[in-house]
Structures are given as structure tokens and as C-alpha cells.
Image (cartoon, rainbow, N blue to C red):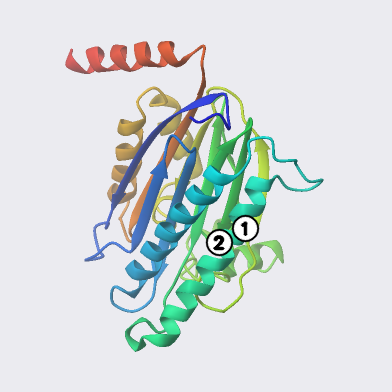
Amino acid sequence: MTARSHFHLEVASATDAGTIRSFNEDSIAADRDLGLLVLADGMGGYQAGDVASSIATGLVMDNLKRILTEMAPSAIRSAKLSPESIAIKSTIEKTNLAIYQTAQTDSKYTGMGTTIVLILFHHGLASIAHVGDSRLYRLRQGHLQLLTRDHSLLQEQVEMGLISSEDAKVSHNRNLVSRALGVEAEIRVDISEHNVQPNDIYLLCSDGLNDMVDDVDIELAMSELRNNLPLAANQLIQMANDNGGHDNVSVLIAKVRNGDNVKQGLMDRLFDWLKSLG
């Protein structure tokens, strides 16, 4: 990582079209040195979703990299949000407008949009932002916690008591988002900040994972494979496909380490590799 944080990151990712879709509209990007991970799940006509998600990850990564590189490390924290979180919010809002304008000026992209979820590690904090129903989980001491709230019709119905959480899992409306980038000229971004601890593991995923795999199974897989992130990422994709693979599925995983346990992490991976050979 850079001087913005005393933590080091291990990062792994995987993405797949699933067993039914012929192309993949998800887009993922990560800059381990910057501590930034971004995932977008596109929607729209043929390949328009792919365009929307690619624009989202590309613009967010490029603009935040420039802004954060130029930002003074000693920037003063406001009462509510850090300068980093404010930069994230502004960047996503500008990205939304860019996608919206692209859809308005090219008929083949009419109606396209995308979710987005991202995390930035800085100064011992994790800034988390999202729009739509792509999710971010944290595994801490073996417990998986959802840190985002779905912007979806189903989530609103559950919160209003119109449908139970159990019924929501099998509803045909579970893919209807209530908020997405590119649909309107202005967008409301949910953003929060969380304290980071060594050995925290953060999972960003498109709904192709959590629609197909229960949280308890995600927790179990991540706990068992916490020392082998590439294997964990591929295992989550395989679990989604084994359960039907009805949608594109993408995951980004980041494990937080401080300077004292980086060497231990290398030993853990070496041990897992040797064990796999046996």
C-alpha cells in the first residue's frame, strides 16, 4: 500500500458469465497499491450493460487514482466524511452523468445502466460506496457481515413488511434495482466509513453470487479458504454456477494485513500449496 495506510492488502478476483448468459456484463478493477477495488454489474440491451459497467469501472479507477495521488496525506478530516470519501462520492456522481449522456447520444445504448460497489482503504479506514444491488461483505473473526444495503424493489418491500426475507429469496423480482448509474442525470450514492482491522477480509460481489449462494455458505467458504484468496474467489464462482449460475457472477476479495503478519501470510500460502500437492 501507499503511505495512506499502514496496512498491506492481498487481492484476488474472478468473474464468469454463468451457465445461462452468453456474455458477461460485469466489470471489475483493482489497484492493490492504491487500496482501491471496484465492481460493476451492467444492465441494458445487447452488450449495452457491458459498456455501462466498463465505463463505470474505468472512469472511477482513472479519476480516483489521479485525485488520490494529488491529495495531500495530511488532508483534514471533516466532521462527517474523510476527504477520500468525498472524492469517491463526487467521482461516482460524475461517472453516472457520463454514462447517462452516452446513453442519450447513442440509440444502441438507450436504457443502459450499471450498479457499482467499491472500497478504498486509507488511514486505517475503509470507505465503502455503492449504487444498486451489488454487495460488499466483511469477514471478521469468522463472522460474515453485509456492509451494504441493496437498492432494489425487493429490499424496499422487505423493509415495508410486504414480503418476508424467505419469500424474497425466491421472488422473480429480485433483480429489479431501484437505483443504478446512468438511468438518470443525477444519482444518490450511499457511502460509509468503517474501521479496519488486520485479517479482515472484504468481499465485493455482483448479485449473481448472493442470488445463488446463501450467506452462510459464503461465510463458510471464505473462512475455510481465508489463506488462499485466489482459490476462495474461484470457489465462490463455482458454487454460484453449481447452484444454477443464472446470472453473471463476479467477486473481488481483499485481505488486510499489517506489516507484522505479511511474512506469516506468505508462510500460510506456502503451507496451503504444499498441502494441495499431497
Q: Which mark is residue 200?
A: none
| SS class, disc 2 | helix
Residue at x 47% of width, y 80% of height: 101
- Quarter residue 91 falls in: bottom right
- Quarter residue 162 falls in: bottom right
Crowdedness near tag 2: few (<14), some (14–19) or many (≥20) residues, C-alpha within 10 Å: many
Which residue lies under the disc numbered 2?
Answer: 92
Which residue lies under the disc numbered 1?
Answer: 89
Residue at x 42% of width, y 36% of height: 32
Amino acid type at image mark 2: Ile
Which residue is most to the left?
277
Say if 28 sits above or below 177 in the image: above
Res. 194 in view: yes
Residue at x 41% of width, y 25% of height: 224
The answer to whether the residue labelled 2 contacts the one labelled 1, judged by CB atoms less than 8 Å apart, is yes
Residue at x 49% of width, y 50% of height: 66
* The one of 97 and 221 positioned closer to us in this rendering: 97
State the image coordinates of residue 20 (x, y, percent, origin top left).
25, 63
Amino acid type at image mark 1: Lys
Say if 1 sits above or below 67 in the image: above
Q: Is residue 74 left or right of residue 120?
A: right
> Distance from label 2 to label 1 (Cα)?
5 Å
* The one of 263 and 205 positioned closer to us in this rendering: 263
